[in-house]
Amino acid sequence: MKNVILVVDDDKTNLIRAQKLLTPQYRIAACNSGNAALKYLEEHRPDLILLDINMPEQDGIETFKHIRAIEGLEDVPIVFLTASGNSGDVATAALLGAVDYIKKPFQPEELLKRVRRVLDKDKISKIESGKMDIRMVLWVIRFPWRLGLLQWRMLMMP
């Protein structure tokens, strides 16, 4: 089962570009505003969120704060993907707990590399925090073709 990435950007071109680049390896959900993202998150829990800062109505910083207030989404990694060159935005994102900040226009290889790194770190932290049983990890290493069953088991874990 592929990881799910929520991409939030008010620019349709950026949404399409990110979708085309990430779709071969990940399942992509796309929202064109912070409010649409919050509505999506009422019923879904992605593995990663790519969030634009500069959006009308509700900017990415406000959206980030709302996401962190939703029960069950406190630990979903969020990467800001934005054209903003404001160093204050970078500092605010870091203080709030964003795991990365990628400037647009992004280089495809750079985006893929950073997304992989964030998702790999998230898996390692789940193992270390005890959210993933080490026996399951060893089982997947021994039988990688059974990864889908492991992901199903993880969904069933409290």
Image (spheres, rainbow, N blue to C red):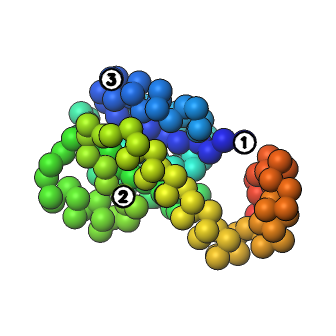
User: Dividing the picture into quarters, in which one does residue 125 lie?
Assistant: bottom right
Q: Quadrant location of the C terminus?
A: bottom right
Up-down: is 43 above or below 77? above
Up-down: is 115 above or below 138? above
Q: Which residue is mark 2?
A: 100
Q: Secondary structure at mark 3?
A: helix
Q: Which residue is mark 3?
A: 13
Q: Which residue is mark 1?
A: 1
Residue 137 lies, in percent from the top left, at: 77, 66
Q: CA distance from mark 2 to mark 3?
A: 22 Å
In the rendered structure, which amino acid carries the disc numbered 2?
Answer: Asp
Q: Earlier in the sequence, mark 1 or mark 2?
A: 1
Residue 85 lies, in percent from the top left, at: 15, 49
Q: Earlier in the sequence, mark 1 or mark 3?
A: 1
Query: Does 49 sit left or right of 12 as displayed?
Result: right
Observer-nearest residue: 38 or 60?
Answer: 60
In the rendered structure, which amino acid carries the disc numbered 3?
Answer: Thr
